[in-house]
Image (cartoon, rainbow, N blue to C red):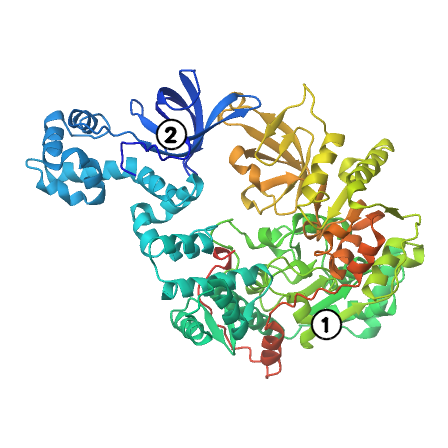
Amino acid sequence: MEMGRHSEEEKVGYIKGELVYTIFHNETEHFSIAKIRILETDEDFQEKDVVAKGYFSTLQENTPYFFYGEFEKHAKFGMQYNVHSYKTFIPDTKDGLVAYLSSDIFYGIGEKTAEKIVGKLGESAISKILNDPKVLENVPGIKKEKAESLARTLQENQGFEHVVVHLATYHIGLKMAQKIYQAYKEEAIDILEEDPYRYVFDIEGFGFQTADEIAGRNGLAPTHPNRIGAGCIYVLQKSVQEGNVYMPLDECTTRVLDLLATVDLTHDVIHNRLTELNTEKKIILQEGNVYLPSLYYAEDGFAAQVKRIMSEETDHETPTAELMKIIGSMEEEEVLSYGKEQFEAINQAIHSKMMILTGGPGTGKTTVVKGILNAYASIHNLSLNKEDYQDRSEYPFILTAPTGRAAKRLTESTGLPAVTIHRLLGWDGVSGFEKGESEQLDGKFLIIDEFSMVDIWLANSLFKAIPKDMQVLIVGDEDQLPSVGPGQVLSDLLSSGYIPFVRLTEVYRQKEGSKIIQLAHEIKNDQATNLENDKDFSYISCYEPQLLDVIVKIFSKAMDKGIEVRDIQVLAPMYRSQAGITMINKELQKLVNPKTPQKREVRTQDAVFRVGDKVIQLVNQPEDGVYNGDIGEVVAIFTEDENTDNVEQLVIVYDEKEVVYERKDYTNIMHAYCISIHKSQGSEFPIVILPVVSAYNRMLRKNLLYTAITRSKQSLIICGEQRAFVRGIETMDTNKRYSALKEQLQARLEKPLDVSEEHEEEDISPYDFM
């Protein structure tokens, strides 16, 4: 599209206007809200000014722009113009161009110099300079410094706009265009047209199909090596989203052929391209498996770290009689009695460099963890109270978990401080972790809870930071869902046969008459399951059309009994569908926190947030001390004229910690009256409502339902179809994850342990690939 003209072919309307004033501008995102004086428009709008919002850079005063988009009505602020793309209006007459180039925008360019430029380069002077700044060398009398300054200012003011306008012809939106421009600047268009597949690797969220469509439009052959290479990487990236660490070569090849769907491509062609990518170090081929580099180094590195830690012996041996005496004193003090399995677990943990403690609900994992801490402290004559240490870095115990809620539970159950793994390692949210091989953790005994949630990337980062003289206790339930990220680290550690472990099987809480515990172990052990009501369990039969009403009624009755909303949690496996998480949240918000004239609210494209809403954090936000899975409450909403930052703000409290969100951050939260079962991992709730209907069938699996049921502490209510529930617990998770960690561990640990062996690893931050 030529600069300075708007086309009748534009699919959306336009406004030609000038900046009155900027209401809001985010330099990082290029998101702006501005009052615009309308000079010309094809929209049916009679006012002289309009509020425009969209992803555009800082606008200059007294400079006309074309804005392309459409009107939308904001519930509070009225009609606003939602901008899809824009460009600076550049006059297409010589007089207009002279006036533009001699304006205050271009320092040092007076009217006479501007006349020389237009006289030499003509009415297309601007586009010529943008395409090749050297054309200014042909203009008589213009100094080199002035020419460079003019070209630089044009690129700064119009480079982004020029890219945006061009990308719009490929149906690439303003927000994605902003990401692309940040990455490539003025090279963006050349890269797009020469090799759009580069965008797939460099720009988060840019899809292979989009690149493929652009390549087709630009005549790139379907058999072009760049297309094949991008297809290979894309298939591997999709595989990672399924939890795999690698793909078998033949399966990878077949999936690439299916994706590219080109007759002239064969298995040999794909194999050859994969070999080239391996040479280029864009992938790694190892023993018939295809890895993305970050995952190969994470898996290989983690196995090496495990061997390094286990190569050291513990520095003490406590006789059984002495340990029994210590445990006897603990039993008297705690008024409890450790079982045979529990004593074995304490003994094993005290004498192992690394040990895994696993078992289902009610088997006493928490009791054993506390026993291990007390026994270790007694043997080494250490205090468990952090306040007793003048230098806090000398405190020997470190307790950590993958999520904030899991860390909070660990603190509550042990009475000792626990933090998330990300916080422990000092993640900055961008480039990686402060702790690692060069700066390891301080302490003597590390406990990692809910380890089934830890993926191979995080496991490798954590274990690199563990010093060789530290003992490690891994705690987790192997029957829960595996990590959201790639790998099955806990399962592989257990099945390797080389890591000491104790599996607790005796159920203590079931003896107290817990139907929840009974149900969980019946599922775990593949026993016939009945849904008969009990004091801590209820089953309500209903079908999908009735489900929302049933959930609302259960919630309403609980509230009538004085139960706090934060203590009731609905868990569901799917977001979409009429019985999905999104719809359940909307209905429960109407019940729990309805719209009132006195209650403030903010609207986004997907939701309405009100003061009093229960919400969940969706991503790690270490700078604010909140992490994925943390649940909080909206306590305040401020308009842009009510705070010094002059932006709309939403304030959420997480366990007495206040976090302020600006509008651009609203995508980091969602309502939490109902959350996904995956998001609930590591958490426990007094009351869990679990809807199970046939509409969920493709998601229902034994480990998913087991995880949901074991989130409940006091009361579990299953509502839905019994046949869907039975079908779910009879369905094993057949999505086998590709991981070579078990074999890596066996290969390393069956050899004589060599303390001097060091693992060389490329300097790659796995979080660049997430």
Q: For the point 47% across and 69% down, which residue is it? A: 761
Which residue is denoted by mark 2 in the rendering? 67
Q: Position of residue 713 (x, y in %)?
A: 82, 49
Q: Position of residue 592 (x, y in %)?
A: 75, 31
User: Alpha carbon of mark 1 to alpha carbon of mark 2: how far?
Assistant: 70 Å
Q: Position of residue 757 (x, y in %)?
A: 51, 77
Q: Position of residue 110 (x, y in %)?
A: 14, 26
* SS state under label 2: strand
Evaluate if marks 1 and 2 touch, with contact meaning CB atoms under 8 Å apart: no
The kind of residue tagged 1 is: His
Residue 203 or residue 304, whichever sits in front: 203
Q: For the point 63% across and 40% down, which residue is it? A: 670
Note whether 62 is above or below 577 in the view shown: above
Disc number for residue 351: 1
View extreme (left): residue: 140
Q: Splitting the image into 4 quarters, where does residue 493 fall?
A: bottom right
Callout 1 crowding tier (Cα within 10 Å): few <14, some 14–19, many ≥20:
some
Dividing the image into 4 quarters, which one contains the N terminus? Answer: top left
